[in-house]
Image (tube, rainbow, N blue to C red):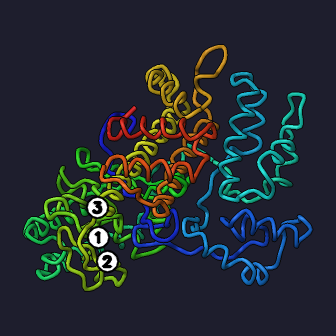
Amino acid sequence: MADGGVAEHAQQTESVAEPATGIDGPTAAPLGAPTVRRAFGSLSPAAVLRLQRAAGNAAVVTLTEAAAKLRSERESRPGSPTAPGVRFRVPAPDELKRLYSGGVIPQSVVEDSVRRALKRMDADFDLRTGADHVMSKLFPGGGKFDETAWAGVLGTDTGDVYKSVLDAETQLKPADKTKLEDAARRAGDEIDKAMADATGLKEVFGTQAALAKTRYGQAKAALKAAIANSDKAIDTDYNRDDTQTGLGGWARHDIQHIHLTGDVAEVKDLNQSIITLIHEAAHLAAPDVDDLGYYKSPGFEAMSDAKKVCNAAHYEELPARSLGVSAFVGKTFTPGVKASGGKVTFEDEVRRVASEYLRKAWDAAVDAHQFVRETAKEIINNPAAKPFDKHKTGLLEVSKMEHLTIHQQVPAPSTVTTLDAVLSEGVAHGTRRIQGKLKNQTVPATKNKKKAADALIDGAINDYGELLGSGASEDRKLMDWLVKHYRKGF
């Protein structure tokens, strides 16, 4: 967090897709739009090319043709995103025009930054044409930004546009507060069921069943108090930054505060909202309930009893069984034993080490984005407090490492723009994509666990390839820097 405090991030559960959409599993994207970038989201380049050629490069096909020709392509890419609305974003055209002509950011820097954002979008196949073609239309030369070309090359879907930093962490709307209060009551009922389930407590928490039961009770009390004081104790993200970065929510025990994603706050999926509230309330229950591994992450079911009772995601399991959404139906969590019944192997251990590294890098990237975004909000809401000067050292470091525009402003760094928010969000989004590449990596033939994990990490980074757009070594340097800043703030 920007203040150096500890934010317990709940990551959106990873399943077959790179970023699933919620705590309780992925949501499939409907084939709802006729263009390549909307109907197909993340297909192989060859598949997109074949489709474009068949359509005369118009990139428009019927939904029936889309489903028939390219479903197999999607299924052949297990790391591809399927969640609707989860894609990189860019500033709105009027905002870009203002930044391009404003004089604070050199025009060449604006162009380089927009190109980087577009290449990230292109890597997810979210562009109608390639990034370079889009750039040539938006920036035709002569210091001109052509906002009239926007709809032709980027479309009119506002999901591609970063709207307002002011809506990213804000109070619940009255209608959502009412729905969330109902979800919280149901969450309390599920906690009661978990506490009464002596067999289930033993199956999940083993020798720590009694302590887990106590913490469930503490979580229920903390959640009840937070809901009763929701204007101060709970906020949400109506700007949908969380969706882009893979954040499922966060909570801080020290200030008894919960942050929820927009979908959870709006109770788009009741079960998801219930389980998310229980996960976050577990963080409020005791200061040592942390995030040591998310639901279904490598080694989740094989963790030691001491770690499980201190891991918020494990408090999801009994409610998930009750609600019929568990991934471990009928399973007993035995330390050192996988859900399949086999013992944890050296390869499993390596994958967990790599998974934890990537999780920490992602977590820190989300913190960095929140730091950048919250400073931008402070500049808008309270400029007299000189928030930029207050956070200048950290902002410049983040800007240089993540290739933002702050350190390149003229005549001297002075503000945080929407473009910086977009770029920092893109780094967090990219680290989430990299996590999804881990499952495709092969553990090398070595008995050195660190070297083997490093090989997996480098492979995932290389497979993604668009974190900074300046090469794998720069990407790894950024990831190492993020891991060093894990839970330390900026």
Question: Looking at the image, is mark 2 or mark 3 earlier in the sequence?
Answer: 2
Circle number at residue 320: 2
Residue under label 3, please give it: 346
User: Which residue is at the front of the view, 294 or 80?
Assistant: 80
Residue type at mark 1: give it: Glu
User: Which residue is at the front of the view, 474 or 362?
Assistant: 474
Quarter of the image containing the C terminus? top left
| Residue 216 on image: x %, y % | 17, 67
Q: Residues within 10 Å of mark 3 (few under 14, many from 20)?
A: some
Label 2, label 3: how far apart the Cα atoms are: 30 Å
Tell whether label 2 touches label 1 (CB within 8 Å).
Answer: yes
| Residue 139 on image: x %, y % | 84, 37
Label 1, label 2: how far apart the Cα atoms are: 6 Å
The secondary structure type at the circle numbered 2 is helix
Tell whether label 3 touches label 2 (CB within 8 Å).
Answer: no
Which residue is at the far top?
Answer: 411
Q: Residues within 10 Å of mark 2 (few under 14, many from 20)?
A: many
